[in-house]
Image (cartoon, rainbow, N blue to C red):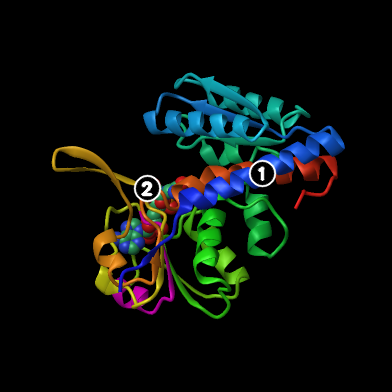
Amino acid sequence: MTAKVIDGKAYAEGLRVRIAKAVKELGAKHGLKPGLAVVLVGEDPASKVYVANKAKQTVEVGMNSWEHRLDAATSEKDLLALVDKLNNDPAVHGILVQLPLPKQIDSTKVLNTINPAKDVDGFHVVNAGKLATGQDSLVACTPVGSVMLAKDALGKLDGLEAVVIGRSNIVGKPVAQLLLQENCTVTIAHSKTKDLPGVVRRADLVIAAVGRPEMVKGDWIKPGACVIDVGINRIERDGKGKLVGDCDYASCSAVAGSITPVPGGVGPMTIACLLHNTVRAACAQKSVPVPE
Ligand code: NDP
């Protein structure tokens, strides 16, 4: 079997078109222009690329975008003061503090200082708690994008065996919560899981969020299963830099029914879902319905 390739780039493009339409409608009907503020501390090259892409796509869908670039030596106090200012700015509907933060700053403290209503990354403990208890909330972008792609490939997820590899607060746990909401039977695997290949072989749906290049092999995959590869790993191969996922694409795509490529799978969904969260946050703050 050769797996159907799940085109996250195309899906994300479609989502951005729908978001641009919604933004236009909010302007016309309610005089509302959603706005996203992104804060970058330091010079991490990958973070700089992410932040630039976020700003570009925010403007492309017609929203306001603000970038706050702070020196790597910025104190926690100064960063918290900026977050507080953004919390109190009515034009700012979404706030994203790019991770990782420099060592002198407590990331959890910063994330929990963001007003939960503006927490478009969905990392605030209030939003994580609402997700865990089935209440409406802003949900982390990569998990939402991963589940959208799984639903696009499989239709209804009811009753499927899903195995999530990874239990981080930013991917593994929220993905597992979303899959539970979709009525999957969810197993969360991690570095202490015994017989990981055997656990993964049970899955109709595998979500890999490990951060280990090409760890999941084709003989771990149940024939016909859907594989959503969240991993983004930069490796050297044949003297060249290359991005690969957490799944060994060649062997997994020979067994799976559908699979996301890296790049071009989950990656593009993350920013599209961030823009969607910003629209949702703006509508909630202005008490207007989210356009269809
Ligand atoms: P973390 O490092 O925070 O978490 C990794 C998880 O994988 C942990 O729960 C860890 O287990 C588990 N793990 C590590 N090694 C093994 C192993 N050998 N066997 C089984 N489980 C293992 O990573 P993130 O969740 O932040 O990210 C995961 C991947 O997703 C990365 O490649 C990252 O680049 C990518 N990513 C992609 C995004 C996108 O936009 N597409 C966004 C965010 C992340 P334990 O808890 O026991 O240590």
**Which x, y percent locates residue 233?**
31, 46
Q: Quadrant of the N terminus?
A: bottom left
Give me the C-alpha separation between circle 1 and circle 2: 23 Å
Q: Is residue 140 left or right of residue 243?
A: right
Residue 263, which numbered label?
Answer: 2
Judge the density around disc 1: few (<14), some (14-19), many (≥20) Cα neighbours within 10 Å: many
Q: Magenta span has 174?
A: no
**Which x, y percent locates residue 59?**
62, 29
Q: Is residue 288 left or right of residue 194?
A: right
Q: Secondary structure at mark 1?
A: helix
Tag 1: amino acid? Ile
Region of the chain picked out in magenta, as a range: 194-210
Residue beneath disc 1: 19
Q: Is residue 110 left or right of residue 104?
A: right
Instruction: Pick the residue in front: 248 or 41.
Output: 248
Sooner in the amino-acid sequence: mark 1 or mark 2: 1
Judge the density around disc 2: few (<14), some (14-19), many (≥20) Cα neighbours within 10 Å: many
Tag 2: amino acid? Pro
